[in-house]
Image: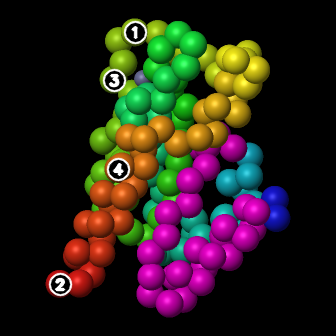
Amino acid sequence: MVMLDFGAMVAQHQLRNGQFFAFEHPAGATSWSQPSLQALANDPRCFSVDFDQCQVCLRCPKTGKLIKKRTRLLSNAPLIKDIFAPLQCKCTSPHAHIEGSVNGMSLSVFCQHYPAEFCEKLAEAVQLTVRRVER
Ligand SMILES: [Zn+2]
């Protein structure tokens, strides 16, 4: 909760200074109801977008099956919505469930690490946002 409030504090700092932020957290997390996150979510400059991490290639390291993991980004950078809103599950094969462990690491801990494709999309959003601001 300390780190969550700290993240929200950094986001508020960015807002106050006319800068951008993106706050990532599982879409179903109860911590979205924390006052610090509610204050951000209720700010008219902010929005949230939910997407499925199977669309950024989150895979079970053991079976290679995609993992859906519904995820939410809270942000004030419009390109975050443009890039992540289309990433809704379109899978036709069953997903791996986030349960058990692989090579001594619980799959839930494994899934806390961002897939490379998620990082690339986030970097793309930052790059395009910076370009847009510089014009
Ligand atoms: Zn999927």
Residue 41, percent across and down?
57, 65
Mark 4 closeness class: few <14, some 14–19, many ≥20 residues within 10 Å: some
Residue 78, percent across and down?
33, 66
- Residue for point 42% across, 41% down: 116
What's the residue type where badge 3 is placed?
Answer: Lys
Residue 83, percent across and down?
31, 51
What's the residue type where badge 4 is placed?
Answer: Lys
Q: Dot 4 lies on which element?
A: helix
Front one among 128 and 79: 128
Q: Is residue 12 on the magenta stretch? A: yes
Image quadrant occupied by the C terminus: bottom left
Q: Dot 2 lies on which element?
A: loop
Q: Earlier in the sequence, mark 1 or mark 2?
A: 1
Image quadrant occupied by the N terminus: bottom right
Q: Work out how far the residue at label 3 is from the one at label 4, CA to CA, in angstroms.
A: 18 Å
The residue that disc 1 covers is 93
Tell whether label 2 touches label 1 (CB within 8 Å).
no
Residue 49 appears left or right of 131: right
Quadrant containing ligand 1: top left
The tag on residue 36 is none
Q: Earlier in the sequence, mark 2 or mark 3?
A: 3
Q: Is the CB atom of the residue marked by disc 4 within 8 angstroms of ligand 1's nearest atom?
A: no
What's the residue type where badge 1 is placed?
Answer: Ser
Q: Is residue 42 visible?
A: yes
The residue that disc 3 covers is 90
Q: Work out how far the residue at label 2 is from the one at label 3, CA to CA, in angstroms.
A: 36 Å
Q: Is residue 42 above or below residue 99?
A: below
What's the residue type where badge 2 is placed?
Answer: Arg
The residue that disc 4 covers is 121
Q: Which residues are magenta?
A: 3-29
Residue 133, percent across and down?
27, 81
Q: Earlier in the sequence, mark 4 or mark 2?
A: 4
